[in-house]
């Protein structure tokens, strides 16, 4: 399905929250944008494993505009399994047709190799020439005999003492190994909640708030300690939803 044109007033609103346009400096970590759509009761889906539309068509276009401006797009395995997402970009400037080149490189955080590329929407888009193959971040690469599509790159990363990947080390490694200078993180809840507590990793926070409630069974997002200070906050109001853009204040 084609997208609505981007609302003109979204462009100046988003400008200061996009990755820098200057050539990236080698020793600086990649620019990280954390972005998702939530309900009024802070849920991102109706229930675990249920793909749920929250964004209006206007903010759906905004998501693709943001995808256009990033080198990588990252989701957790829970999202990859629940949503079977495409993670490509269907927006491009007026004089070009969107294609795989406009799309960010999908990055799936899947320590235990639970998600399969074979038969996925991502694979279909890549075969059609409208999306890129993913990097799957794993604790240990699967044996060669289990790899059915050689375009998928499995990237081994070390786990920390909590048996999780350390975000700062991981984004730095993605830049070093794959030249990914900007990463748009879309979710899901585990990833969002961890990153809301990481002002050292997240540069921009862009949250779409839909005029809907998803109820108690919904998958909620909120930072573990509640100790997040937002700065440089701005709001955009659309037809049915609003968008908040902000930065996370780094503690001294
Ligand atoms: N409304 C929205 O904007 C979005 C909604 N969603 C929804 O979110 C739900 C999925 O959320 P979750 O189940 O929380 O899954 P998730 O996508 O956050 O994935 C969780 C899994 O990712 C891996 N993971 C995440 N962080 C890790 C780390 N630091 N180290 C090692 N492994 C790590 C683990 O395997 C973990 O079980 C779905 O219902 C989906 O529809 C997902 C993305 C955006
Ligand atoms: N921006 C936004 N609004 C919503 O209402 C959503 N449910 C999501 N979900 C994210 O988009 C992914 C789907 O991507 P494709 O359209 O298949 O490319 C999904 O996995 C979530 O990350 N986002």
Image: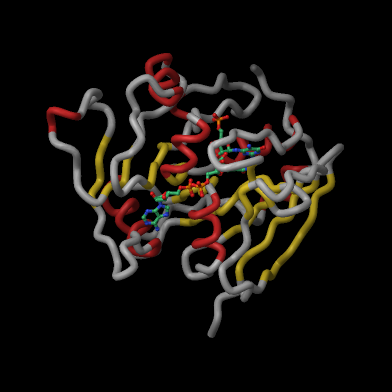
On the question of residue 14 being in view, the answer is no
191 w.r.t. 134: above or below: below
Asked whether residue 169 is in view, the answer is yes
Is 66 in front, or is 207? 207
At x 25%, y 24%, the residue is: 149
Across and down, in percent, residue 203 comes to 55, 61
Tell me: 184 left or right of 93: left
Residue furthest to the bottom: 252
Q: Position of residue 247 (x, y in %)?
A: 63, 65
Classify 181 as above or below 93: below
Nearer to me, 64 or 185: 185
Q: Is residue 156 left or right of residue 24?
A: left
Q: Horizontal placement of 40 versus 14: left or right?
A: right
Q: Quadrant of the N terminus?
A: top right
Farthest-out residue, front: 217
Residue depicted at x 44% and y 28%: 101
Location of residue 100 by image quarter: top left
Q: How many marks?
A: 0
Farthest residue, direction top: 128
Specify the quadrant of the image occupied by residue 122: top left
| Ligand 2 image position (quadrant) | top right
Nearest the eye: 82 or 94? 82
Residue at figure coordinates x 73%, y 64% from the top left: 233
Residue 242 spot, x, y in % from top left: 80, 47
Q: Which residue is located at x 38 percent, y 22 percent?
A: 123
Structure colour scheme: secondary structure
């Amino acid at each position: 399905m084609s997208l609505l044109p981007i609302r003109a007033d979204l462009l100046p609103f988003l400008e200061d929250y996009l990755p820098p346009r200057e050539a990236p400096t080698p020793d600086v970590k990649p620019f990280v944008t954390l972005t998702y759509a939530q309900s009024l009761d802070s849920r991102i889906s109706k229930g675990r494993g249920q793909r749920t539309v929250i964004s209006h068509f206007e903010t759906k276009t905004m998501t693709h505009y943001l995808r256009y401006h990033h080198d990588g797009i990252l989701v957790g395995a829970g999202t990859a399994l629940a949503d079977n997402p495409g993670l490509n970009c269907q927006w491009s400037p007026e004089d070009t047709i969107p294609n795989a080149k406009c799309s960010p490189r999908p990055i799936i955080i899947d320590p235990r190799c639970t998600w399969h590329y074979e038969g996925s929407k991502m694979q279909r888009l890549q075969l059609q020439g409208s999306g890129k193959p993913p990097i799957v971040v794993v604790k240990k690469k699967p044996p060669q005999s289990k790899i059915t599509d050689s375009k998928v790159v499995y990237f081994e990363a070390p786990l920390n003492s909590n048996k999780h990947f350390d975000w700062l080390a991981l984004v730095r490694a993605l830049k070093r190994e794959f030249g990914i200078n900007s990463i748009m993180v879309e979710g899901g809840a585990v990833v969002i909640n961890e990153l809301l507590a990481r002002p050292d990793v997240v540069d921009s926070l862009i949250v779409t708030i839909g005029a809907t409630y998803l109820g108690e069974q919904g998958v909620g997002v909120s930072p573990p300690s509640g100790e997040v200070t937002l700065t440089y906050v701005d709001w955009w109001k659309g037809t049915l939803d609003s968008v908040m853009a902000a930065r996370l204040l780094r503690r001294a």
